[in-house]
Image (spheres, rainbow, N blue to C red):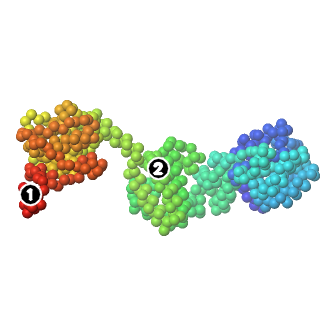
Amino acid sequence: MPYEITATRKRPQTFDDLAGQEFVSTTLRASIASGRIAHAYLFSGPRGCGKTSTARILARSLNCERGPTDKPCGACDSCLSIAKGSSLDVIEIDGASNTSVENVRQIKDEVLFPPNSSKYKIYIIDEVHMLSNSAFNALLKTIEEPPPYIVFIFATTELHKVPATIKSRCQQFGFRLFSLDVIKGLLRSAADDMGLEADDDALLWIAREATGSMRDAYTLFDQVASFSDGRITAAKIRDKLGLVGSERMGALMSLCVSGDRKGALETLDAILDSGVSVEQFASDAVSYIRSLLLVASGIERESLLGAPRSSFPAALTEALDAPRLERALSGLFDLYRDMRYSVNPRWELELAVSRLCAIRDYVSSAELSRTIRGMKAAIVEGRAPGAAAVGAALREASAVSPRIEAAAAERPDPAAAGAEPPAENPGSATPGLDVDGIDTVALRASLLAAVGKNRVVLSTCLERSGDWVVDGDKLVIHCLNGYDAGAVLADAGLLAKKALDITGRPLRIEPRAAEPAPAPTPPARSGDDEDSDDGDDGPVDPVGIVEKVFRGRRVSAPASNERSESWT
């Protein structure tokens, strides 16, 4: 007896044998049983999901000598001839090789003649989307009003290429891909029929590789059975087809999780030396980590995991959480895309494996944010060891402007640097956080940073000043002498503006000194030179600086006959 491939041998012969397409079989059986037989059907769906087989079952049900019936006998001359493909009343046409309008005209001529020995003349046109537009137009009238004994059955894998005028004249049935459980069950039945032993994980791998196509599953099953010597195992599949295998992939991932780069790269080298291609390894790694991600999400169903649950060690699933697995999976997707344009795909793979060895150190942004919030709450609430003083300071500083907090953090500690503390004046308040809630130390640092750029004299006077005290709406600055107080008073408007920007409160600057301050003579400034970035009133006046430092005055220019005299 000649060898018959599994896809042909296991082709369904009745609606009861049509697995995985319950909607289609139920609807067709009900229409046949009620006598509501349409003149045109359109079957669409992916490859290998049973479209042509269903068309033959429907033809057998309509032309069975006991029919039309939803359970053809399979023993009459009509059923046997349809099964062999020799029936004169069931014509199968390949749409890919009969695309012209002349082929359709031949069909139009043939439909005028009744069937030879059956009740219906049935035309099964496979891959009907390959017909030309002219051929489709020639079919329109025939499909819409055919003779009562004509039935058209169209099958296509690309429904969007079929004109809407054809679709509207047909009953449409959408075929679905087979689930892994259905494919695995049918493969088990095929193995039993052939007297083969097959491990569950091996059949599950074949079912997963078929990607929902039953014909692809049977084809791969025949290939595997040819080298399995009566027993199909995952190890034989891995060795003969050049696969990584869940055991070796699990061992490699365990080395990556433990951070053993040397061991992981050596294991990778051994796997590639065994004949596994770089592309195949990347594909298997993606599949394995995807399954780990599903396990980390609480999924246990083997048909969704694509492998038995025992293929994933408990130590590995416990060590990696979902965010880290998502990170690893994203990196492998990038690897697969980058290998096409790489100088050396193997080097790209080794780099990806080396990066996987640091996967446990990865911290997601969400986890980092939660940790920071928890630490801050523990410090503020005083739950952390030694955090009582820090928490009190944080609670008091929460009312201070963020800009003051930043300036206080940047200000150096004079005591730590060995510098002398600023001069104290009698009656001044304690430096630090004022009773009004303003940190005068931070305010002083911020104002010095703001005016030090273009106000050299003012900055010098402020640096050698004593304590700063906020008294209501006044900022009292205890200056070293009357000159310093006068310099501060001359730029009191600028200081008040900067203090408002920093604290958010309007404060009037009041310098105080032991000796009275001289009347300020602010230098003339042009409004055109105002620095809009730092709020300065104008450019630096060198002569004005000399006047203030040496307590001099500017005199008018000498007359023309006294040019030899000098300045006083």
Q: Is residue 424 visible?
A: no
Classed neighbour count for the residue bearing mark 1: other residues with Cα under 10 Å, few (<14), some (14–19), many (≥20): few
Query: Type of residue at label 2?
Result: Leu
Look at the numbered disc 2 and give the secondary structure of its residue: helix
> In percent of the image, x 52 and y 59: which residue is there?
336
> In percent of the image, x 56 and y 63: which residue is there?
242
Would you say 82 lies left or right of 425 here?
right
Seen from the viewer's position, the closer of residues 169 and 240 is 169
In the picture as drawn, the residue positioned furthest to the front comes out as 561
Residue 348 drawn at (x, y percent): 47, 63
Residue 196 drawn at (x, y percent): 67, 55
Q: What is the number of the mark on residue 567?
A: 1
Residue 30 drawn at (x, y percent): 79, 38
> In percent of the image, x 78 and y 51: which residue is there?
154
Quarter occupied by the N terminus = bottom right
Would you say 291 lies left or right of 133 here?
left
Q: What is the number of the mark on residue 162?
A: none
**Residue 367 lies in quadrant:** top left
Query: Type of residue at label 1?
Result: Trp
What residue is pinned by disc 2? Answer: 325
In the picture as drawn, the residue positioned furthest to the bottom comes out as 343
Residue 54 vs 282, above or below: the answer is: above
Would you say 426 lies left or right of 4 here?
left
Quarter occupied by the C terminus = bottom left
Would you say 152 lies left or right of 532 here?
right
> In percent of the image, x 63 and y 48: which residue is there?
180
**Residue 126 lies in quadrant:** bottom right
**Residue 148 lies in quadrant:** top right
Look at the numbered disc 1 and give the secondary structure of its residue: loop
Seen from the viewer's position, the closer of residues 57 and 334 is 334
